[in-house]
Image (cartoon, rainbow, N blue to C red):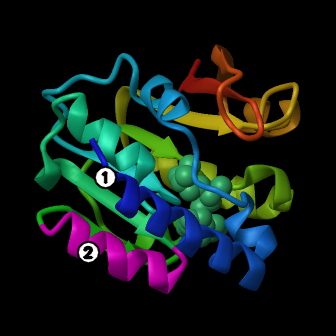
Amino acid sequence: MLSKALKLQETSSFIVEWIKSPLVTASVIPSSTRLAKKMVQGLSPDSEQVIELGPGTGVFTNQLLAAGIKEEALVLVELNNKFAGKLRKKYPQATVINGAAEALPRLQLKKANAVVSGLPLLSMRDKQIDAILKGVFDVMQPGGVLVQFTYGYSSPIKKHLLQQHGLVAQRNSFVLNNFPPASVYHITKK
Ligand SMILES: C[S@@+](CC[C@H](N)C(=O)[O-])C[C@H]1O[C@@H](n2cnc3c(N)ncnc32)[C@H](O)[C@@H]1O
């Protein structure tokens, strides 16, 4: 379990990054542990590769490890260089990429069992989401799942984008104990 001091430190670094860039950081504080547990529910501990997009301070990463997924099986793609630097120190055996999720096709990664996303899709344009979805499902093993949370009331990915990519989005859970409350969606190929 994270010590109170470390948790406080991570929360304050999140607030600082949110002040600098509110649309990209997209949340004032990190997600709750309750939401993080729901984000990793059902993922196999034997996963050979799990990609996390927008890990921030690593709340979901901690739960991926707690679920038994090996640190060396994790690829963390984080745009913010402060967060990326901290993730490298915290998870030395994971592959940490300081870059945009849109760049996935250029990273030449091996196929992933799952992609867990903390990306702020609600503040992104369709074109950007389109590029991210293409990259995500190109790097995904058949049958793999994209796990995405949203503060919105419906699917974080609009209907026309789901159709365009041949995807289905299913609400897996709702977490009240998060600021703000959030829903977890599983997005898969039809
Ligand atoms: C809402 S925060 C979620 C952080 C963490 N997963 C959590 O739930 O506490 C969004 C994160 O996505 C990162 N981010 C935003 N746009 C990104 C992009 N295009 N590619 C990679 N990371 C991005 C932000 O820097 C931030 O760390």
- Residue 35 in view, yes or no: yes
Q: Provide the residue span drawn in magenta.
A: 79-92
Write down the residue under mark 2. 88
Of the numbered discs in the image, which one, if any, rests on residue 140?
none
Q: Position of residue 31 (x, y in %)?
A: 58, 45
- Locate the N terminus and report the quarter of the image it occupies: top left
Quadrant in which residue 173 is drawn: top right
- Residue at 85%, 30% in the rendered image: 159
- Residue at 62%, 26% in the rendered image: 184
Q: Position of residue 79 (x, y in %)?
A: 54, 76
SS at circle 1: loop
Residue 137 is left or right of residue 16, and the answer is left
Amino acid under label 2? Arg
Amino acid under label 1? Ser
- Sort mark 2 into few (<14), some (14-19) or many (20+) by Cα contacts within 10 Å: some
Write down the residue under mark 1. 3
* Magenta stretch secondary structure, dominant: helix
Q: Is residue 2 above or below residue 33?
A: below
Q: Position of residue 82 (x, y in %)?
A: 47, 84
Let me know if residue 85 is in the magenta part.
yes
Let me know if residue 147 is in the magenta part.
no
Whether the residue under disc 1 has CB within 8 Å of ligand 1: no
- Residue at 33%, 37% in the rendered image: 63
Nearest to the observer: residue 107 or residue 14: 14
Quadrant in which residue 161 is drawn: top right
- Residue at 65%, 57% in the rendered image: 29
Mark pair 2, 1: CA separation? 19 Å
Nearest to the observer: residue 80 or residue 180: 180
Quadrant of picture, ligand 1: bottom right
